[in-house]
Image: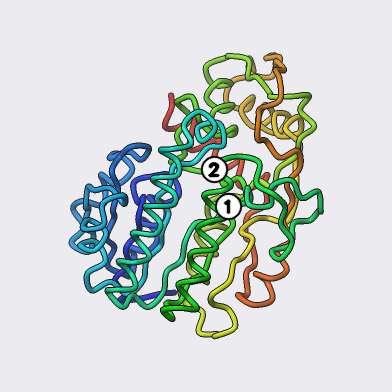
Amino acid sequence: MLKDKKILITGGAGFIGSNLCEYFLKNNEVICLDNFSTGHRHNVELFLSNKNFTLIQGDIRDLDTCKKAVENVDFVLHQAALGSVPRSINDPITSNDVNVTGFLNMLVAARDANVKRFVYAASSSTYGDSENLPKIEDVIGKPLSPYAITKYVNELYADVFSKTYEIETIGLRYFNVFGRNQDPNGAYAAVIPKFVKQFIDLESPVINGDGNFSRDFTYIDNVIQMNELALSTTDKEAINTVYNTACGDRTTLNDLVKHLKELLSEFNSEISKIEVKYGVNRDGDIPHSLASIEKAKKILGYNPKYTLKMGLKESVQWYWDNLK
């Protein structure tokens, strides 16, 4: 385990960021930078009394804020971004400002502060229109949304900074991460928390399309494992590249709904009677997503501890406890 380091986690009040804060606070000093545009203060409330935790409310679009946040930091875990393909289609300018300009600001600040390593949240959306399955890191297609473009640009900037300024960077291409602290509310809520909340409220979820699109749903604890491996590796061959961060398995939305209904029906049998509705396909959606995790296994020693069903069971219990 990583110990006695000073780690900046941008977007630390968000879903993934707050889980990373909680994990790394056990043995390290953690600085959380967040502007609370999509993150929530209640995600980090419990950490405020910890002397090893510092909260900076600020925006990565402001370079001075980024420079302040990286002072005397060993590592950066850059999670701050405006997620959601539909959000980027509705407002590409803001997505670009946060995900590209903000990312560049953080890279510059990290470079100037001599940060040891910059690990950042990349995205499976980078695979775009590539129909190859499983997705292998070196084979990508054309982006299908403004969001996907921004995340690909992140990888390009990281590569250039590694080669030009010798800052160590590692990108983690997240595949449909889910788990505790993921917000079920709002127009751009991810499918698992959104469906769980709707079932708990005895409402019918709406699947976009016929439900046969598939995803490599990845539990949050697998993502935490990958971030730690990315920070702690001493293998020079392991840095300045990108890794799929996933389970290496895919599930259709129809099957996902079945799993959720089974798990939630243990709490309320009425949920088993709820019928699902079907809508139109969303613009920019990739039909199928399945990661090859061989590169992460071979180079970083990645071994995902949670299958989809294990993660769903943990998640459903968490939502039942926190939404009721």
Q: Are marks 2 and 1 in contact (CB under 8 Å)?
A: yes
> Residue at (67%, 14%) from the top-left corner?
274
Q: Give the residue type at disc 2.
A: Tyr
Which quadrant, please, contains the C terminus?
Answer: top left
Q: Which element carries disc 2, helix, strand or loop?
A: helix
Describe residue 57's horizontal placement relative to residue 259 as left or right: left
Q: Report the disc number at residue 147.
A: 2
**Mark positioned earlier in the residue sequence (2 or 1):** 1
Q: Is residue 292 above or below residue 199?
A: below
Residue 15 as seen in the image, left or right of residue 203: left
Please give the residue where the numbered disc 1 appears in the rendered image: 123
Image location of residue 14, percent across then percent down? 39, 44
Closer mark to the observer between disc 2 and disc 1 = 2
Which residue is at a point 47% across and 61% down the rendered structure image?
A: 120
Q: Relative to the observer, which residue lies in front, 258 or 69?
A: 69
Residue type at numbered disc 1? Ser
Q: Residue at x 69, y 49 (%)?
A: 142
Circle 2 crowding by C-alpha within 10 Å: few under 14, some 14–19, many from 20? many
| Applied colour scheme | rainbow
